[in-house]
Each structure stands twice: as structure tokens, then as C-alpha cells.
Image: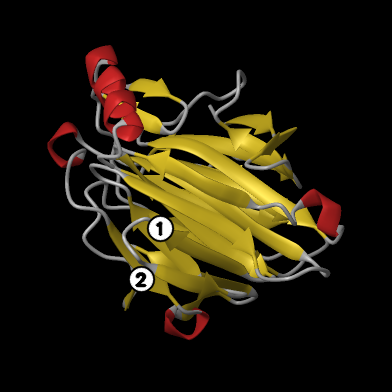
Amino acid sequence: MVRTVVGQPTSDGAGVRLTRVMGTAALESLDPFLLLDEFRSDDPDDYIAGFPDHPHRGFETVTYMLAGRMRHGDNQGNSGSLGPGSVQWMTAGRGIVHSELPEQEQGLLWGFQLWVNLPARDKLTAPRYQDIPAADIPELMLAEGARARLIAGRAGDATGPVSGVATEPVYMDIALEGGCHCTVSLPAAHNAFAYVYQGAAHAGPPSNTREVRRGELAVLGAGSSVELTAADAPARMLLVAGKPLAEPVARYGPFVMNTSEEIRQAFDDYRAGRL
């Protein structure tokens, strides 16, 4: 059965106000996904301090921007800027210390960050970035009145630009006109969710959909297809699926490993400057 959870207001970084949709008491995780945040505000006081230098090890962060600009940099000398419609898929691997700071002092800043777990064999891999500009993300028609931006995975004849990810993700940003219906095929063994960030829609496996409203995430579980039907007004949502890892998860702050001993080692390495 499809179940829904409501995002919870919180703050992170240096006081950035955001909505945490996954990584809460209501939905701790959905293997292989660990966290989903939406940040959206046109008040600079809500976001201007950004996310100063902080470490990561053992998982991947996916930042998808809808509006505004975010600059990132790390302790390896990498830097770049994310603008509207762009994506950064960062594999932290054995460790990185990076920052994410708004490149604006006013206006709307709107986007999402998703955390994706890495399998044990890849947790100490070399860090890497996939910075994808908006123009490189294919757009396709799922049905009449249903458009999608395909960030990762396959849909029809299209393939998303993100590649080489162990969990074989599908990540789509779907826009539905009012009353529009479509069916999206997904890998049968993947866990999937839909997060509605505009309007409302029914979502779920065929003959088992339920209404999902703005700010709600629908846990869709595993299955080969998902039906989406917008309410009378247009709707937009993230539809995300990934191959579950079915491995132990030890998680503390910015580190996600398989054992508590590995978490302690991550803190030791960070304090010693080895990330």
C-alpha cells in the first residue's frame, strides 16, 4: 500500500531553513535513499549563510536546482556553480570536505538535496563529481500533457546524463497538466518514491494510487510501473527509484558507513585531516 509522509521544517548548515522530507522520525530512509531536503525561500535570511565547509564519507549527495544559484568548493581544489535546472551528483567516497554557498543576496533560492547510500565495496572509493548543466538534461513527453526532465536512468529512448552509479537510479522531474494521466515504467526491484512540490496528484502502482499533496512524499515501494494523475490544477513532482543495497547502515552526522567502528574511523580521519 502507498503511504505518505509530510516534510518537516528544520534548519541545517549555518542556519539554512529547509523542509526535511526523508531522514525524519516519520521516514528515516528508503534503501538506498537516506535523506531528502527541499530548500525554498525568497528571504535571504533563510539561506544566505549557506553550508560552510563540512565533511562527507560513504555516500553520495545529489543537488538539483530549480531557481537561484549555488557555488560549491572543496578541499581538493574543485569548485563550480549550480544554476537553475542544473544537477550535481557528488560521490563522497572515502571523504571530502566541501561547502555549498548561495551565489545571490536576494531572490528565490529553490532546490533539493538527496542522499544516496554507497555499497560497502565503494564507500572508500575516490571522490568524484558529475556537474550537469541544465541544457544537458533531456526532456521527454511521457504522455499528452506530461513532461519529464530525466536526470538519471532510462525512460523510453532517453537516457539521463548521470552515469556510473552503483544503485542504478532513476531520477525524474515530472510536470503534469491539470487532469493529466501517465504511467512510468521503473525497474521492478527498485524502491521508489514520489515527492510532490507543486499542486497535487494521485500516485502509486496501478489500481493502488492515493492522493499526494504539495510537500508530501509517497513511498511507492518496489514495482515495475507507477501511475500518476494530476488533480484539476498542474502538478510537479520528483519521481526517484534506486536498487536497494540490503546492507547494514551505520550513520552519524555527515558519515554513512556499515559499522560503528567505521564511523569512529571516519571521525578520526576527519580530525587528522585525512579526508
Q: Quadrant of the C terminus?
A: top left
Q: Position of residue 186 (x, y in %)?
A: 36, 53
Q: Residue at x 27, y 31 (%)?
A: 269
Q: Residue furthest bottom?
A: 135
Identify the mark at residue 160; answer none if there is no mark.
2
The mark nearer the N terminus, 1 or 2, is 1
Q: Amino acid at mark 2?
A: Gly
The answer to whether residue 160 shows anywhere in this view is yes
**Which residue shows up at 48% across the image and 79% down it?**
140
| Residue type, numbered disc 1 | Asp
Please tell me whether mark 2 sits on a helix, a strand or a loop: loop
Tag 1 residue? 74
Q: Residue at x 62, y 75 (%)?
A: 84
Q: Nearer the viewer, residue 270 or 138?
A: 270
Q: Secondary structure at mark 1?
A: strand
Badge 2, how many Cα within 10 Å: few under 14, some, many 20+?
many
Spot the residue most to the top. 260
Left or right position of 114 against 230: left
User: Residue at point 30% right, 21% down?
Assistant: 263
User: Quick check: 261 left or right of 44?
Assistant: left
The quarter of the displayed image where residue 7 is located: top right
Q: In front here: 239 or 11?
A: 11
Q: Is residue 266 rendered to the left or right of residue 113?
A: left
